């Protein structure tokens, strides 16, 4: 075991022999690439924000069109929801490949290849004649889009440490959080002028523009002396070393369960708002935007006020507590124990649940990555894979009882919240670790 920059022990991910990193030193914060990237400041932040915004854009622009896709392709709702599951599963599996690749070859090359494949797959989705083909190319879209997610996190780890890293992730949440606010609105407006295929045409154009921005303005942040040698075997040993760290694994699982609760909302809310409560696509996009604004606002509170003043694990525990209480309230409301709360009541519960994510997600990422200074790509891949796989599993579960009830959504959210709390208490155990182990991160 080694120690992270904040003082916390981390798994020895450097391996041995051919799999060892070319230097065992801490991140070279003074290297020319990192100095240039940090000097770019806002520009690099915007580029990374754009990369992390691609998943919500790919998902949320498409959400208002789910009922229309169901009708156009003559497919049941559960089958159409698999187009979301396929994209999520692709993003999860793709990160396992791209993360280690970025540790070996640097950040830019795998990122650009992934972006090009994403553009092609998204364009094909626009012409899919059947639900089966759409599901297949949504899987490819997710596999390729994973590059932006995993490499953006790895770049942040290359550039920042400790509390500064937590603040940066909160800033990224502000930028990437705009995507889920405007994406359903854009999707709903696109549907006013064309059908659901036009949404994929817009996503293709966004992918092209973002690729050009990356080519011009995102520098390489992993210098050759910090890259890892070796092939697939080395990558697997590196990930095994990361997972051997109980605390790191705990944070990864917390992130996965929290994301599953979030995606239960994302995949079920179009049907809850439009089918159960009779709202329009415009109403759904407005409510989705309001909930996303709550997530962004709390994320900024976390980065600007809480980080550096309150222990990150304490903030994380508070966020998980609020998340759990919101899920309990949603179970009570959707089961009708206290009567029918209507769209307003359910929307209020979902708003609180989304807001809690504003402190849960950035702090989990910062705490996990602070333990892995030498394999940020692989660590980022494990964090993302856990999140997207659990999200993919949550998607079909929320529709298991049909389109006429929101109970499965609320139950999935509550179970995931309780599992996340359990991982914090059993695996991470921040209050049982010494102050040297917890550190300031």
Image: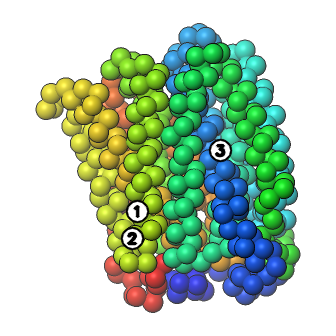
How many other residues sit within 10 Å of disc 3, few (<14), some (14-19) or many (≥20)?
many
Q: Nearer the viewer, residue 220 or 386?
A: 220
Q: Secondary structure at mark 3?
A: helix
Q: Quadrant of residue 11?
A: bottom right
Q: Nearer the viewer, residue 1 or 160?
A: 160
Mark 3 or 1, nearer chain start: 3
**Disc 3 and disc 2 in contact, CB within 8 angstroms:** no
Relative to 33, 395 lies left or right: left
The residue under the point 66% across, 26% down is: 199
Q: Which corner quadrant holds the N terminus?
A: bottom right
Marks 3 and 1, Cα distance to the nearest angstrom? 24 Å
Where does label 1 land, which residue? 301
Q: Report if residue 417 is visible in the image.
A: no
Where does label 3 land, which residue? 54
Q: Indicate whether 265 appears above or below 421.
A: above
**Disc 2 and disc 1 in contact, CB within 8 angstroms:** yes
Q: Position of residue 23 (x, y in %)?
A: 79, 85
Q: Indicate whether 339 appears above or below 175.
A: above
Q: Secondary structure at mark 1?
A: helix
Q: Position of residue 133 (x, y in %)?
A: 72, 22
* Residue 306, numbered label: 2
Q: Quadrant of residue 26?
A: bottom right
Q: Secondary structure at mark 2?
A: helix
Q: Position of residue 326 (x, y in %)?
A: 28, 47
Q: Report if residue 138 is visible in the image.
A: yes
Marks 2 and 1, Cα distance to the nearest angstrom? 7 Å
Relative to 46, 6 lies left or right: left
- Number of numbered discs on residues: 3
How many other residues sit within 10 Å of disc 2, few (<14), some (14-19) or many (≥20)?
some
The residue under the point 53% across, 49% down is: 177
Q: Position of residue 328 (x, y in %)?
A: 25, 45
Q: Indicate whether 79 appears above or below 3.
A: above
């Amino acid at each position: 075991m080694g120690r992270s920059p904040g003082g916390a022990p981390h798994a020895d991910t450097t391996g041995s022999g051919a799999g060892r990193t070319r230097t065992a030193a801490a991140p070279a914060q003074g290297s020319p690439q990192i100095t240039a990237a940090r000097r770019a400041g806002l520009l690099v932040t915007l580029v990374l924000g754009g990369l992390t915004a691609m998943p919500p854009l790919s998902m949320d622009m498409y959400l208002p069109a789910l009922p229309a896709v169901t009708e156009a392709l003559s497919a049941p709702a559960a089958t159409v929801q698999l187009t979301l599951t396929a994209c999520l599963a692709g993003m999860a599996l793709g990160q396992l490949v791209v993360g280690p690749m970025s540790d070996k070859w640097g950040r830019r090359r795998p990122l650009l290849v992934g972006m090009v494949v994403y553009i092609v797959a998204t364009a094909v989705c626009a012409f899919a004649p059947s639900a089966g083909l759409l599901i297949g190319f949504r899987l490819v879209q997710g596999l390729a889009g994973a590059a932006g997610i995993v490499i953006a996190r790895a770049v942040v780890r290359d550039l920042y440490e400790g509390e500064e890293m937590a603040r940066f992730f909160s800033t990224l949440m502000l930028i990437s959080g705009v995507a889920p606010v405007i994406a359903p609105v854009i999707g709903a407006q696109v549907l006013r002028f064309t059908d659901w295929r036009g949404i994929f045409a817009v996503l293709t154009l966004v992918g092209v523009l973002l690729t050009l921005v990356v080519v011009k303005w995102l520098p390489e942040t992993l210098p050759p002396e910090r890259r890892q040698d070796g092939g697939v075997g080395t990558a697997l040993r590196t990930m095994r070393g990361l997972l051997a760290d109980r605390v790191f694994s705990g944070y990864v699982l917390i992130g996965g369960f929290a994301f599953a609760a979030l995606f239960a909302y994302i995949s079920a809310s179009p049907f809850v708002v439009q089918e159960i409560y009779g709202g329009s696509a415009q109403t759904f996009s407005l409510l989705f935007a309001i909930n996303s604004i709550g997530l962004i606002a709390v994320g900024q509170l976390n980065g600007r006020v809480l980080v550096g003043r309150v222990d990150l694990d304490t903030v994380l525990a508070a966020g998980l507590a609020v998340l759990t209480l919101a899920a309990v309230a949603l179970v009570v409301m959707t089961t009708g124990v206290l009567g029918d709360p209507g769209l307003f009541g359910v929307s209020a519960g979902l708003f609180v649940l989304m807001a809690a994510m504003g402190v849960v997600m950035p702090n989990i990422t910062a705490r996990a990555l602070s333990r892995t200074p030498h394999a940020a790509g692989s660590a980022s891949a494990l964090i993302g894979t856990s999140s997207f796989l659990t999200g993919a599993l949550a998607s079909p579960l929320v529709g298991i009882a049909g389109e006429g009830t929101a109970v499965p959504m609320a139950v999935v959210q509550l179970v995931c919240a309780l599992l996340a709390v359990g991982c914090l208490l059993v695996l991470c155990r921040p209050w049982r670790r010494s102050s040297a182990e917890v550190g300031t991160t």
